[in-house]
Image (cartoon, rainbow, N blue to C red):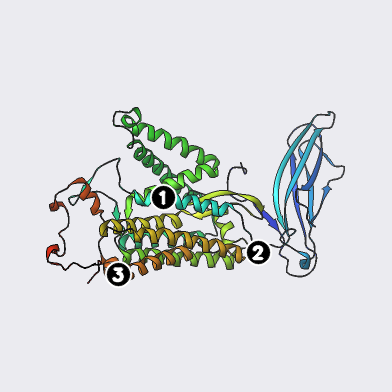
């Protein structure tokens, strides 16, 4: 089901190391387990107008597929000279048409399959497709909205006198994340991108994603009236929905089910985890940047495929958001962005919104959303300006951190922004009318009647 999955088709080609014309050939074997003979005709064709010449040769005495035997075909491809290679002619999709009919019959059966051929595996083209900006716009809007509504409503759990609002992302959780990321990448590299490891990672991601669909369904059901049918049986309905989405994905991996599971995955992360202040946010973001850049550099210098293509080829699972390309590109049929490249900014925006509500302002959330949009714009420009893939986190994380840091310095609140405690949304308790005994004691009290009648600004001093 290549038409619905974002996994790139396997490609082959030549390494053009000189100015000579490159040749390539593949052997197609067709086995006959029947007791009758068949006429077999094999043809190659391409949908693109390129300079790549195609030819087919039968490696057999009479060209007939005899009983209990096999027939071989050599599929040739001839490339233009290296100096003549352009972004339009250095690769092509090849459609192979196999026509089979019984010797004593006129009925024909046709088998078709496609393959991707390139005249230079090391050729890198500057490419742009509107699918990437569209995907970024959709996910940014969803993340900005979700980060503002992070309270869990499907269940209640009292922890230390407070309703559970998510686990704190401390240095221990960051260390576990770094260890899991680094060990997973090391195992993948050490096993030379083993299929067993790939399938294991896909199963783990799909399983957690299916549970995320269940959680998302229960959260949405709780928005309905208490006496509604869906609200009464929300657990059963959520289980059915998660299975209807999760099981088809296991077998066919269509991109649209991948995106639903990925968005539910992000929903789960933003709802269940919270950043406390700038210190932990910076630790999480910078560690992620180092890991992403290290993995991208390794792929760049050790693999023929680009970073983008390698990730989609090896790890086509709900750890990334995908959208099919509008224009055909070599070795790539979808635009994609990492799940964590959206989930981590979502956690950071959630922190910014809590700071805003704590200080009764809007500047942190506004700075976070604007910096996210600007950084993604810079990343898109970088992807079309250079021939090599660059991780999104190298643009998004430092720009968001810098924007909110400058905003805190402008408001003279950098100290509280760096070391403060914004794990809980105190405005929620004020709206609920909870007594002050359930809230943290203020650090100091001000007698507003004793202040002079001048305009004041909140500071850390």
Against 220, residue 275 (above or below) is: below
Q: Secondary structure at mark 3?
A: helix
Mark 1: few, some, or many residues within 10 Å (few <14, many ≥20)? many
Q: In this view, which residue lies farthest toward the front?
A: 453
Q: Could you tell me if residue 9 is visible in this image?
A: no
Against 200, residue 170 (above or below) is: below
Find disc 1 in the rendering and name its residue: 266
**Where residue 342 sits in the image (x, y, percent)?**
44, 55
State which quadrant residue 253 falls in.
top right
Q: Are marks 1 and 2 in contact (CB under 8 Å)?
A: no
Q: Are marks 1 and 3 in contact (CB under 8 Å)?
A: no
Residue at (36, 41) in percent of width and height: 215
State which quadrant residue 408 falls in.
bottom left
Q: CA distance from mark 1 to mark 3?
A: 29 Å
Find disc 3 in the rendering and name its residue: 414
**Where residue 353 sits in the image (x, y, percent)?**
33, 56
State which quadrant residue 439 falls in.
bottom left
Q: Quadrant of the C terminus?
A: bottom left
Nearest to N terminus: mark 3 or mark 2: 2
Q: Which mark is residue 124?
A: 2
Q: CA distance from mark 1 to mark 2?
A: 32 Å
């Amino acid at each position: 089901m290549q038409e619905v999955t974002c996994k790139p088709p396997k490609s082959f080609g030549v390494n053009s190391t000189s100015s000579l014309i490159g040749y390539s050939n593949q052997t197609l074997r067709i086995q006959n387990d029947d007791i009758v003979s068949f006429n077999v005709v094999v043809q190659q064709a391409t949908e693109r107008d390129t300079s790549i010449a195609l030819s087919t040769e039968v490696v057999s005495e009479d060209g007939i597929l005899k009983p209990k035997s096999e027939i071989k075909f050599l599929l040739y491809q001839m490339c233009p000279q290296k100096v003549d290679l352009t972004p339009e002619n250095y690769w092509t999709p090849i459609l192979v048409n196999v026509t089979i009919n019984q010797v004593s019959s006129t009925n024909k059966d046709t088998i078709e399959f496609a393959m991707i051929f390139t005249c230079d595996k090391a050729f890198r083209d500057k490419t742009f497709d509107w699918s990437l900006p569209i995907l970024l716009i959709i996910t940014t809007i969803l993340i900005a909205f979700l980060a503002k509504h992070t309270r869990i409503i499907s269940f209640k759990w009292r922890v230390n006198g407070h309703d559970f609002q998510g686990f704190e992302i401390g240095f221990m959780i960051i260390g576990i994340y770094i260890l899991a990321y680094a060990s997973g990448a090391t195992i993948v590299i050490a096993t030379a991108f083993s299929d067993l490891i790939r399938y294991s990672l896909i199963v783990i991601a799909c399983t957690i994603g299916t549970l995320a669909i269940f959680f998302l369904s229960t959260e949405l059901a709780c928005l309905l009236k208490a006496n509604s049918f869906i609200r009464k049986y929300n657990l059963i309905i959520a289980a059915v929905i998660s299975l209807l989405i999760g099981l088809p994905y296991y077998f066919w991996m269509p991109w649209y089910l991948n995106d639903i599971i990925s968005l539910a995955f992000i929903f789960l992360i933003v709802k269940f985890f919270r950043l406390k202040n700038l210190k932990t946010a910076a630790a999480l973001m910078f560690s992620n940047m180092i890991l992403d850049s290290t993995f991208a550099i390794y792929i760049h210098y050790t693999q023929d495929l680009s970073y983008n293509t390698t990730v989609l080829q090896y790890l086509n699972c709900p750890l990334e958001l995908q959208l099919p390309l509008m224009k055909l590109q070599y070795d790539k049929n979808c635009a994609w962005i990492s799940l964590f490249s959206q989930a981590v900014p979502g956690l950071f925006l959630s922190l910014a919104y809590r700071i805003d509500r704590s200080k009764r302002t809007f500047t942190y959330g506004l700075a976070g959303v604007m910096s996210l949009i600007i950084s993604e714009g810079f990343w898109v420009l970088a992807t079309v300006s250079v021939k090599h893939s660059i991780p999104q986190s190298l643009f998004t994380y430092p720009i968001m951190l810098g924007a909110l840091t400058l905003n805190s310095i402008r408001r003279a609140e950098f100290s509280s922004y760096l070391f403060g405690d914004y794990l809980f949304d105190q405005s929620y308790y004020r709206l609920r009318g909870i007594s002050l005994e359930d809230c943290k004691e203020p650090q100091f009290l001000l007698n507003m009647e004793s202040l002079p009648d001048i305009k004041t600004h909140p500071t850390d001093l």
